[in-house]
Image (cartoon, grey):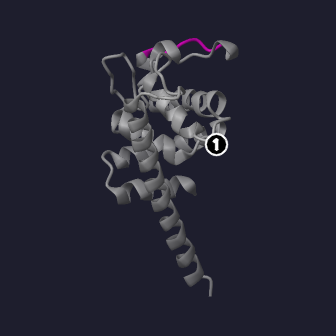
Amino acid sequence: MLTEFLCIAILNLGLPNANFACEYMETVVEAANTNDIRAELIVAMIYYESRWTPTARSKSNACGLMQVIPKYSGNRKKGIKNYTCKQLFNPITNITVGTELLSRWVNKKYGHLKRGEAMGVCAYFAGYGGRCASRKPRKAGMRYSNKVRKLANRIKKEVNEAQKEHDLVKLDYSY
């Protein structure tokens, strides 16, 4: 059900490529649940990283919806080799890998901190060489983190509104 409400939320907010995004919302929700990350946060990150353009590629060779850098896409502990950009252009692969990377930052690296989510999003943006956990995190990284989390909260608010409307409609027809 969250899948449908997320789709309604991004359509209501008028985000670009919302119809395309809706096709992959089930993957977003599944990845969010698997990695203990808010689905709204993933949707917001994808919006800011690629505007839901699956073949997006940055100057730093970050690929796909969540702008995953291939050399950081694997997981030695799990025996997963790094992905190629071609593989990361697949939306399902990209969402799955990108959410797992975000989870490493948010839950494993900074999960013990009060501002763990903010620091984790900043670190995802800044990369392994970036400075986000210091007393003075980079302003650009924190601006990005605040922007992403603000949109995630707007999406959550829209999801809650859609759920309320859905519940009201259910009550009307339950007589």
In percent of the image, x 41 and y 26: which residue is there? 67
Q: Quadrant of the C terminus?
A: bottom right
Q: Which residue is the site of mark 1? A: 33
Q: Is residue 35 visible?
A: yes
Q: How far from the left and from the top, in percent, is residue 164? A: 53, 71
Q: Residue furthest front?
A: 135
Q: How far from the left and from the top, in percent, is residue 63? A: 39, 22
Q: How far from the left and from the top, in percent, is residue 161? A: 48, 67
* 34, above or below 161, in the image: above
Q: Residue furthest bottom?
A: 175
Question: In the rendered image, which quarter is residue 11 located in?
Answer: bottom left
- Amino acid at dot 1: Asn
| Tag 1 secondary structure | helix
In percent of the image, x 44 and y 18: which residue is there? 69
In percent of the image, x 35 and y 34: which residue is there? 50
Badge 1 local density, few (<14 within 10 Å), some, or many (20+)? few
Residue in the foreground of this view, choosing between 38 and 12: 38
Q: Is residue 24 visible?
A: no
* 165, above or below 78, in the image: below
In percent of the image, x 46 and y 49: which residue is there? 152
Residue in the foreground of this view, choosing between 136 and 54: 136
**Residue 80 located within the stretch drawn in magenta:** yes
Q: Which residues are magenta?
A: 79-84
Residue in the foreground of this view, choosing between 108 and 161: 108
Q: Quadrant of the N terminus?
A: bottom right
Question: In the rendered image, which quarter is residue 155 located in?
Answer: bottom left
The kind of secondary structure the magenta stretch mainly shows is loop
Is 71 positioned to the left or the right of 56 in the image? right
Is 73 positioned to the left or the right of 50 in the image? right
